[in-house]
Amino acid sequence: MDNKRVTNKQILDKIDDLKVGEQGLNALAIKIVSRMVKLKSMEDWFDHVNRADIAGAVAYKDLDLTEEEEALGEAAKLMTLMNLFQEDEEYEKCAIIKQRMNEVNKILKKGR
């Protein structure tokens, strides 16, 4: 089964093929929800840190990052958000992220 675009029916068919039973299915569901909660809490933490007081922003500016280093950091953030939005099936947000990623890629190509 291809991991890129999987329908709910494909997932259910695959689970039926595994014959995991109700108990196994419940254990799998708990693991999936747990992983999603961890990812969401990471996103919330990141947003909270980004909104921290001015002292944090000043300290961050003292790093004197190059344009390429800032673009790499932005790319990492965008890829993480893209994964979260794909999992939540928020495709409009994915499209916005993709546009921003194209801009970041231009900066990275310029630096090489």
Image (spheres, rainbow, N blue to C red):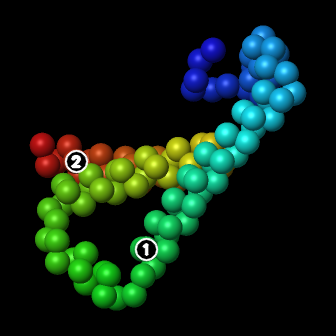
In the rendered image, which quarter contains the N terminus? top right
Residue 26 seen by the camera: yes
> 10 Å neighbourhood of mark 2: few (<14), some, or many (≥20)?
some
Q: Position of residue 22 (x, y in %)?
A: 87, 27
Q: Quadrant of the C terminus?
A: top left
The relative height of residue 45 versus residue 59 in the rendered view (above or below) is above
Whether residue 92 can be seen here: no
Disc number for residue 79: none
Q: Quadrant of residue 25?
A: top right
The residue carrying mark 1 is: 49
- Which residue position holds label 2? 108
Given the current orientation, which residue lies at the most extreme bottom position? 54
- The x, y position of residue 99, in whole percent, is 45, 50
Q: CA distance from mark 1 to mark 2?
A: 25 Å
Residue 47, position as x, y percentages in the image: 49, 70
In the shown orientation, is residue 31 left or right of residue 25? left
1 vs 2, front mark: 1
Which structural element holds mark 1? helix
Task: Tell me the residue at 23%/80% (across/down).
Answer: 59
Name the foreground residue: 102 vs 55. 55
Q: Residues within 10 Å of mark 1 (few under 14, many from 20)?
A: few
Residue 2 place in picture, x, y as percent: 59, 18
Can you say whether 19 is above or below 98 in the image?
above
Residue drawn 74% across the image and 23% down it = 11
The amino acid marked with disc number 2 is: Leu
Determine the secondary structure under disc 2.
helix
In the displayed orientation, state which residue is furthest to the top.
Answer: 17
Residue shown at 78%/27% (left/top)? 24
The tag earlier along the polypeptide, 1 or 2, is: 1
Amino acid tagged 1: Val
Q: How many marks?
A: 2
